[in-house]
Amino acid sequence: MVTETVNSMVPALAVLVSMVASVLILAFGKYPNIREGWTFVAAFTKFSLVISMLPLILDGKVITYTVVKMLPNLPIAFKVDAFGILFAITSSFLWIFVTSYSIGYMRTLKEHAQTRYYFCFAIALSSAIGIAFSANLITLFLFYELLTISTYPLVAHTETAEAISSGRKYLTYLMIAGVSLLFAIVVVYNATGTTEFSFNGIAGLETLERTTLIILFIAFMIGCAKAAFMPLHAWLPAAMVAPTPVSALLHAVAVVKAGVFTAIRIILYVFGVDLMETSGLWLNMAYFVSITIILASIFAMTQNNLKKRLAYSTVSQLSYVVLGAVLITQHGITGGMLHIPYHAFMKITLFMCAGALIVTAKKENISDMNGIARQMPITMLAFTVGALGMIGMPPVGGYITKWYLLLGAAELENMILIGVLLISAVLNAAYFFPVIYVAFFKKPDKELKYKEAPLTMLIPLVLTAIISIIIGIWPDAPGLFLDIVNIAVANVTGGGI
Amino acid sequence: MSEIFEFIAAEYNYWIYVTLMMIGFYAMIAKKNLIKKVIGANIFQTAIFLFYISLAEVEGGTAPILMHGHDGAHAAHEVIYVNPLPHVLILTAIVVSVSTTAVALALIIKIYQVYGSIEEDVILAYRKQLAPEFSEHARQKQEGEQ
Amino acid sequence: MSGFDMIMVHIPLLTVVTPLIAGFLMPIVGWIDRKLCWYWVMAIMFVVLLMASSNLYTVITTGTIHYELGGWKPPVGIEYVIDLLNGFVCLIIAFIGLMVGIYSKESITKELPNKIIPFYSVFLLLITGLMGMTITGDIFNFYVFLEISSLSAYALIAMGDRGDGVVASFNYLIMGTVAASFILLGIGYLYAVTGSLNMADMQNLLPDLYNNNNKVVLAALAFFMVGFSIKVGLFPLHAWLPDAYTHAPSTASALIAGLMTKVGVYALIRFMFCVFTPAFVFDITRMAEILTWAAALAIIIGSVLAIAQSDIKRMLAYSSISQIGYILLGIGLANLIGMQGGLLHILNHAFMKCALFLVAGAIFYKTGIRNIYQFKGLGKKMPVTTLVFLIAGLSMIGIPGTVGFTSKYYLALGSLEEGMWIFVIVILLSSLLNIVYFWRVFDNIWFGHPHEVEHIKQDEAPVSMLIPMVILAALCIFFGLFAYYPLHYILEPLSEALIGSGVGP
């Protein structure tokens, strides 16, 4: 399949917007309104720049732009394809909501060092978009490391001893991942002389010895520790000490999504469908992530802290994405890729609800939330929507991706994987329903008055909940995620839709 | 046995230089007195000078001075003379060695002014005993980690 | 020939002689007015930088420059030779010299108010020594310049912390003398077997002797290796280095850390590739293999020891030991990519380490603190300085987009090309260790004390100190993104030539 390429600097601009904004944020640090104004301007500009590229992508074209020639044979370059723009749309769109939510959250709690917070946030977003648009492994690595560094101050934001030690843990895991990724990149470059992503995988990798290939794959997957596979997941629950908008950023907008995005890029665009199949790596990886899916769900049930429960839920859900990719059937890949935006919308709703509970009701633990829905009915309704999506109940979006994943597993007639998917759906229900039950049906300990979170927080979480439903009812709307994913899948599998 | 003796005797100048060098090296490393260290350095360097001068030696050679014959023509080719280049090099090296010694002695004077001794162990003990910064570091580190 | 052309011809010599004469004139300048000293140094360093750039430009456009001193033809006369390798190193020396010179104005006035004249005098002599070591094509002349630079360095270090500085300087002097004596001995051995002192001439004469398995040449190589290993502070012979870097005045630390060891490494390359040939060093004696393993050891142990330090300058000194390992590793690998990585790291490390030492000096200037556990709130107090530290620190870690990454990437690729997976792991492991010791400083500067720092007011270092730091930090990023240019124009042809048979000096 020949894809037409268009040369345009829009992707570079999209990355640059929030970099520029970050400087302005620093410059206007003393005037909170202007500072946050810049964040909004940047968020909207970024989103419109990303969206402006969508028509071209839907036409089946690819946008490329080379920024600098960093080393001979190693340019820093952008290439926007369907899969890249899928992630870019998700994160740039959600940034708008998170910005609004952050303003409400940070101001209500009167957090310190807010300028640093918005500055790092903007840089993190640049990195996320950079990862989405990377044309080669080196560019991806650049933004991957930048993302790690720029999110460290966010994770350690409160600067308490606990926050610092969690920050260290976060950094340790992700830096080891970075080093491992670099190792893998060096091996790939040494073997093939290029690091550029290709729809069929990088040519020349199949000549590697089997042992080397396996080591390479493992190194890459350790490099994707941002995707929080077990046993490399411990940083994610630890990072829950961060302010809630940061958790939303980590879980939905940027970090873990960047992890799974990278994992899929590596599986499908570096190794390629054929090599994954001939080497048999796909099945091993599928079983490996299945363990994470099940175990993380079980861990989630044991958590009393709502944010930690959500964190383990993320660990489990992320492995769905990777599972979809390694099924290497059309339906499987569709399900995996589609789960990136779908999970993002549902999880961000859940996190924003958790944050609203912290800000308004000062409650973090599920056991304290008896009858909380009487105090915050809108928030808890939104929470329910998100939770239903996670479990996979129509009409909220989640059921669509699960359906595709099941189709993929069924095509392979692999009973184990089908079983894993079904069991995990049950487990999801088992850890989300108690929360809903406690919130709506348990008697509150004392009489609760109606009091919702400030509007800057409430509006975004309601909107994301509504969107989660829309993408469930009308998934195949033209230009929506399924459309984009179909193009991406056609690219990598080489077939039509 | 006599062969070994002859072997040593034949190149005795080189053996002397090696021995001197080792003495100097030993003094630089093992002596605790700073002045003795400097003396060791001097012996070391002098040994190397001797080596260079030995290189230049030509059997039966005279000083490399250009001589004129009675008829005014150059007669230099008539005379066997030693290689002048190493001598020149060593003149330079001696200058370097003297400068190094001068700097070293200046440093020793400074050290004596500060510590009141030129014995290495005394200075070390003095630094350990004072070591205000070391204990300060430890304290700060503890505080920092708490 | 116009007057301008006449000067242009002598530029290789003038690059060395200008700072020498200027250094001796310094007391007169200082006698007129002490404030003039800095301007004098600035003017001279600027001229030297121009000359060094002009040299490199000439080399790139027209090829190697040969300059015969006093008109005596080599191999009898002393010859100055500038090729890509030393043109490149000279430019680094001149640039770092200028940067440190700008910085020194305030720093020296505060730290050494009574020694301004001798400081600048010795400063210029150090530049002379380093330039001379680099440019000369005659090995005995090399020895003389080596001693000029060493003696100046001893003097600079002795001006540092009372007591400690002098002792550090004395220890360095003893080690330095041993090193220089070994090198002198090696020169003597080579002279004994070849009868020549000219590097290019030797390169032609020596190969015949290798075939006869000549023990003298072997001994000479061993003497050079040990001598230079001491000079560059290669791991088991590094004992002098941490004390010397720690207790020197801030300005001198930056200069010595940025340049001294680099020039030592340059000399090692020059002797390995251009006096002895790669065939001898790599295939016949396998000396390079020992070097590579020692370098790998230095990388790890230097980093580990750096973690244990609480004095920032001492931490940076140990980090230098590890970084020198990177350079030597690249050179010891002796394949095209590894070589480029090693040479690139000479440039990169000069930028990074110089910036870091300047920051340490600026912090010391403002607060009198060198203990990293006392750095609390510095992020608020000195935002620019600490930002420079962040950039240079990230660069040391090897974050992509900074200079540290490109050289590490090349070194890893080079190791892989040799099939030495262990070195790849060493390089990556050391990145992690770098994170440990730099992040500790970052944490102390910015995190962990939100309430204590609220009352802290901004109190930045003077502009003349900020300018060089910011320039160096900017270059750390610039050459991180545009490493293509030095690689393509200088290092690639240079590595090819070095590995081929050695560029004739």
Image (cartoon, coloured by chain):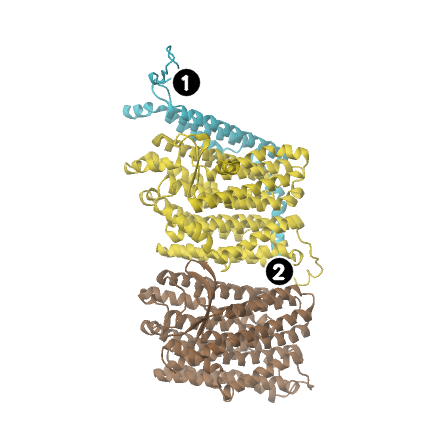
Chain colours: A brown, B cyan, C yellow
Q: Which mark is residue C446?
A: 2
Give x and y (percent) for residue B46. Answer: 45, 27
For mark 1, name the chain.
B
Could one spot residue C84 in this view of the protein? Answer: no
Residue B75's spot in the image, x, y percent? 36, 15
Q: Is residue A161 above or below residue C302?
A: below
Q: Is residue B40 above or below residue C264?
A: above
Image height check: is A408 above or below A7?
Answer: below
The image quadrant of residue C110 is top right
Picture coordinates of residue C272, whole percent (x, y) = 39, 42
At label 1, the amino acid type is Ile
Mark 2 lies on a secondary structure that is helix
Q: Which mark is residue B125?
A: none
Where, by quadrant of the figure, is residue C215 drawn? Answer: top left
Front residue of this view, candidates B122 and C232: C232
Tell me which residue sits at (47%, 45%) in the image: C56
Say what amino acid the circle numbered 2 marks.
Answer: Trp
> In the drawing, does residue C4 fall left or right of residue C228?
right
* Residue pointed to by mark 1: B65
Write down the chain letter for disc 2: C
Above/below status of C381 relative to A439: above
Query: Which SS class for mark 1?
Result: loop
Q: Position of residue A140 (x, y in %)?
A: 47, 66
Q: In the image as oriented, which residue stretches furthest toward the top?
A: B70
Which residue: 46% across, 46% down? C235
